[in-house]
Image: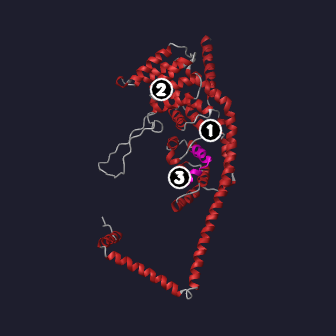
Amino acid sequence: MIKSIKFGRNVFLGIKNGRAQRRLFLTEAYQCQEAWNRRFDSPILQQVKPTDMFFELDSKFNNMGKVGAVDIDIFANTVREEFQVDELLDLLHRLRLSVETSNTLKSTHHAVIRFLLQHNRINDLLDVLDDRLNYGIFPDYFCYNILMDKFIKEKNFALAAKTAALLMLQEDNGHPISNALSVYSCHRYLENPDDWKKPKAKEDDSTEEIKVRVRYLRNPYFDDHFDLIEPLQIVGKTLAFQGKHMDNSLGRTCQLRGMILHKKYDKARNLVDQWLAKVNEEIVHEEVLDLIKKDNTHIPEDQITEDLKNLQVQLDKLRSSNLHKENLLERIENEVKSAVAHYAETDILQQQESFLEWEKIRESTLKEHQALLDKELRLQNIEKMKKELEKKERILTFFENEEKIELEIEKKREMIRQEDEKLAKCPKKIKALQKLVEQEVYVPPNI
């Protein structure tokens, strides 16, 4: 009987903990999936067949070199099938290479991320978000939160930390839920940092030596931001960035651990000096000192610098001061819960309003785009009519202007004769022209 009571109590605690865990994350309602699907009711999108539209846009790119950003937005919002992922990415890349990229609509970013996430094309999604130069897709807070929430629930903390790093790269800390989820993602990722592998450098297997003439050589440059490739340094900079904007013990904790992971030992030591001088109590979480020690175990003895040794002295002083005793993970979880409780409902309302606003913007932009196309077509027709009228005028007035036309012909003949005489005096130019003619009529041999 006692055993069964004990077992029942454990089950109850498990359910209780499970509820607490679920409350930590965003609800299904946060995704606003039903409101998002209502975009298909738009009269504009109902008229579109994605397969036909892709061939039309592809033809426009090939013939004109550009396509309106609103057309790409319509295509991104109408595609549904997984086989259309490659078509969408191809159009995005070509849009990015054209002048129309500056007119990309906000709904395009959101639609691309939702579409790739819907079909679980996570690798493609992360490649697109990381390659901003070639695709130009930038998530909003809503997308960041959905992505991190999905990866956290799947316990894929490496992907969650990669998403959090994108916020750091954009130097964006304007949303409390995004900030809290970023800190949580990075902290949980550091429990098992081997899940995020450093990208391997591409090896050149070619044996052919190719010499390229360059005007000047650039000095090697490392910006310590977009050029970062070490996972621990990226996560460290993300933690330091988020912690810098939190004026409490948790923020200082994140800042300290992040700077050490980022290998900014001198800056970390200066911060500790300032905290010891100005902060009287609960400077950082006591637990972080053991975590920092664990983070540094992978550093070989021969790579321990003087800055790291000096920092260790300051950390020993910090350990003996008044520190925060609360469990660090529980504190971060509470931050996420608090942010979700305060801002989730507001986010949902704002996002639903954005969906309606994007539909109006798409409609007005399409009208403006169509008006411009009509104007260009009218100008082309006018130009064509002018040329036809000039041609008719020359025919009708030929006999009146016969002498004038003959004089123009004589002038052109004289110009050609003078150019021939100049060429006759320069045999080298004649040989060069003959070579060009030979190259034009060159027929490659059959193999």
Q: What amino acid does circle 1 point to? A: Phe
Name the residue at 58% across, 58% down: 52
Judged from the image, the secondary structure of the residue bearing numbered disc 3 is helix
Name the residue at 57% across, 23% down: 250
Residue at the spot of label 2: 267
**Where 257 sits versus 76, above or below?**
above
Residue at the spot of label 1: 142
**CA separation in Å, label 2 and label 1:** 33 Å
**CA separation in Å, label 3 and label 1:** 25 Å
Q: Is residue 312 magenta?
A: no
Residue at the spot of label 3: 87
Name the residue at 55% across, 88% down: 399
Measured from the top left, where is residue 427 in percent x and y?
Answer: 29, 73
Query: Looking at the image, which is closer to me, 307 or 204?
Result: 307
Label for residue 295?
A: none
Q: For the residues carrying marks 2 and 3, which lies nearer the camera in this image? A: 2
Q: Are marks 3 and 1 in contact (CB under 8 Å)?
A: no
Whichever of labels 2 and 1 marks the residue nearer the N terminus, that label is: 1
Q: Quadrant of the C terminus?
A: bottom left
Residues drawn in magenta: 86-115
